[in-house]
Image (spheres, helix red, strand yellow):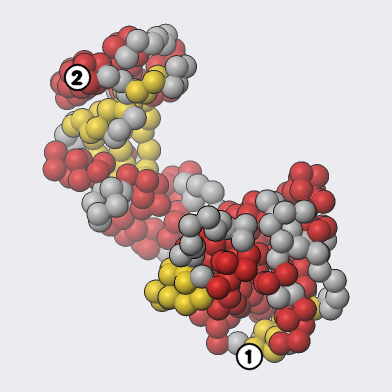
Amino acid sequence: MKKKFISLALAVMVLLSISGCAMSTPASVGSIGGVDIPAGIYLLAQYNAYNTAAGVADLATGETANDVKAVLKAQCTGTIGDEEVTTDGADYVSRLTLRSLQYYAAVEKKFDELGGTLEDAATSEAAQTADSLWESNGDLYTANGISKSSLETYLLNSQKAQACLELIYGENGTEPVSTQDYSDYIADNCYYLETVQLPLFDQSTYAYATEDQKQQVSEIADECRDYLAAATSESALYLAAMQYVPEAFTAIGSSTDSSQALYYAASGLYTPDDLASYDDGTGNNTLINAVEQAGFGQWTTVDLGLSYVVVRAIDPLEYGTVDEYVSNYNLLDAMKSSELQNQLYAEGASMENGLSASAMKTYSASKIKKTV
């Protein structure tokens, strides 16, 4: 599982890599809760906010995200925090920018309060990522008034946020998650799934299965399900993959050998984040609905669009211990990262706002350029 705090920072970097704006002094735009906000951090936050606003802006025909003036004047409707907001683009950008800076400040303050220090691996990762980003997009960052050190500072802030998770909820943290907490979380929120994937998409030709081919794979999936339901061998999952996955490939006009077919069999613990990709957009989870309807321990088949999956859910605590799951899966992140993020956003919003209006005006969103 990728760490949310790191991925949030990288998302900002990627968005920034497509454009730029030439800016100069001042070096700081003020402070939040006594935490200094460097200009480079402000520019990162503002540009990311602009890209978000451009994605929800009600633009006229012919206008695009590259039309900065149009985006800042357009009506934008979206979610900022837990609030549904409809306002003009300039205000939308301003609100998102402030929220991002409040979070940045809250992380810095929390990290210091906890007496945190970053391990060498964390600082090295931030530096290496900054090097990579700078090598790819240094000219654009420079055009945006963003230095390489600003990139690294932002990435270090993300590492600090991740460190706070361990400092608060880790084994030696201020509010450690107990073994019972982990056990309850696994029992109430996670599923242990065994699966065999049968393809409906030929990656070598980028072709989807025809209706006839799909029907053939559906029948193969049913045979695989019945085989697994009757099997008693501990290796049945992998034997099923070796037999039925090649048959499915043949049905869609492709091929694979039995050794490669093993990659289409899997078993493991699924957290809510892992299962989110199977949500159908209406509040239902295609995969979980199917296994719950079938009943725990019972094999069933599910059409996932790009494949049929033969799957069953089993009680995770019957197939592993809490300590094993904590060791092998990033359960602390799954359990507490969203909670901590929300806490940090709230703490940042409550901090004294010492941002300078004149400094921020220097870096007005109206000066953003989408091409260099």
| x, y percent for residue 340 | 50, 69
Quadrant of the image occupied by residue 39: bottom right
Q: Quadrant of residue 120?
A: bottom right
Which label was assigned to residue 175? Answer: none
Q: Marks 1 and 2: which is nearer the front?
A: 2
Q: At 32% from the left edge and 59% from the top edge, which residue is drawn?
A: 184
- Kindly tell me whether residue 258 is visible in this rendering: no
Q: Residues within 10 Å of mark 2 (few under 14, many from 20)?
A: few
Q: Earlier in the sequence, mark 1 or mark 2?
A: 2
For the image, the number of numbered tags is 2
* Residue lying at 45% horizontally and 17% vertically, measured from the top left: 205
Residue 97 versus residue 156: which sits nearer the camera? 97
Q: Secondary structure at mark 2?
A: helix
| Mark 1 residue crowding within 10 angstroms, few (<14) / some (14–19) / many (20+) | few
Give the residue at mark 2: 215
Residue displayed at 36% across by 33% down: 267
Percent position of residue 125, x then y? 72, 50
Residue positioned 83% across, 58% down in the render? 142
In this rendering, position of residue 136 left or right of residue 296: right
In the rendered image, which quarter is residue 12 located in?
bottom right
The amino acid type, in three-letter code, at marker 2 is: Gln
Give the label on residue 352, or none: 1
| Residue 98 showing in the rendered view | yes
Q: Is residue 27 above or below residue 20?
A: below
Q: Nearer the viewer, residue 337 or 301?
A: 301
Q: Mark 1 and mark 2: span between their CA atoms?
A: 63 Å
Residue 153, x across and y down, in percent: 75, 64
Q: Is residue 97 left or right of residue 142?
A: left
